[in-house]
Image (tube, rainbow, N blue to C red):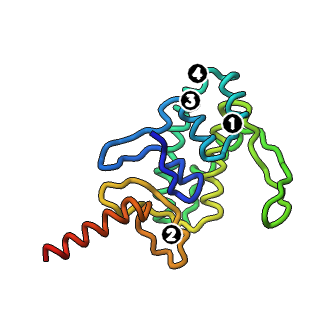
Amino acid sequence: MDAPRVGGHPAIDFLNTAYAPAGEPIETIGDGRAFLAWLVATELLDSAAAGRLQRRLGAAGLDQAAREARRVREWAREWLERWRRRPGGRYTEEISALNRELGGGAWRRQLEATADGLVVRERVRPDDAEALIALLADGIAQLVAREDASLVKQCAGPGCTLWFLDRTKAHARRFCSAAGCGNRAKVAAFRERQRG
């Protein structure tokens, strides 16, 4: 099963690779192939680089990278939960740990043409498993450095474990998706009114 992409930020979509709709846990990066597929689907890695990594690392190496990614995800989930509640904290240990993960990637600068003009971007060169983890660490670092902690939310749907970045104008978003949890909440409220 594919991970839902409702987070609005790569780091939050990464957290959502393990979720529990209706209380049933689902792991979407259970092995190395699934991990590579998720990286390609979220455009953190292009398919050519994924193919090179698959040939270079083999199944065992990719499975190890997926295990490491799951470890980083659970560590990040715990830290980001605390960061949401206390955004002004110093988080010295967490920042050091994240910097160690960022250090695992070989970085390169690249000039890119965007709709807003030319931009110089720094990206991880995905040469090995450590670089894949550095890609994830970069997303987490970008989240905590550039986003407002109060806008990182968990879905208010009963039993939903998904996170999202609330980019709505009024910052009043409550559900991971209007079509899913939002619709279920409306139906439940309607039924409750009908009973009353």
Percent position of residue 66, x then y: 54, 32
Quarter assignment of residue 144: bottom right
Q: Amino acid at mark 1?
A: Ser
**Among the two numbered marks 2 and 3 on one chain, the one whose residue lies closer to the N terminus:** 3
The nearer-to-camera label among 2 and 4 is 4
Q: Quadrant of the N terminus?
A: top left
Percent position of residue 185, x then y: 31, 66
Q: Amino acid at mark 2?
A: Ser
Q: Amino acid at mark 3?
A: Arg
**54, above or below 82, in the image:** above
Q: Which residue is mark 2?
A: 150
Percent position of residue 70, x then y: 50, 38
The nearer-to-camera label among 4 and 1 is 1
Q: Quadrant of the C terminus?
A: bottom left
Distance from the alpha carbon under mark 2 to that under mark 4: 40 Å
The nearer-to-camera label among 3 and 1 is 1
Q: Amino acid at mark 4?
A: Ala
**77, above or below 150, in the image:** above
**Among the two numbered marks 1 and 2 on one chain, the one whose residue lies closer to the N terminus:** 1
Quarter assignment of residue 179: bottom left
Q: Which residue is mark 1?
A: 47
Q: Which residue is mark 3?
A: 33
- Disc 4 is placed on an element classified as helix
Distance from the alpha carbon under mark 4 to that under mark 1: 16 Å
**Looking at the rendered structure, which numbered label has been put on residue 59?**
4
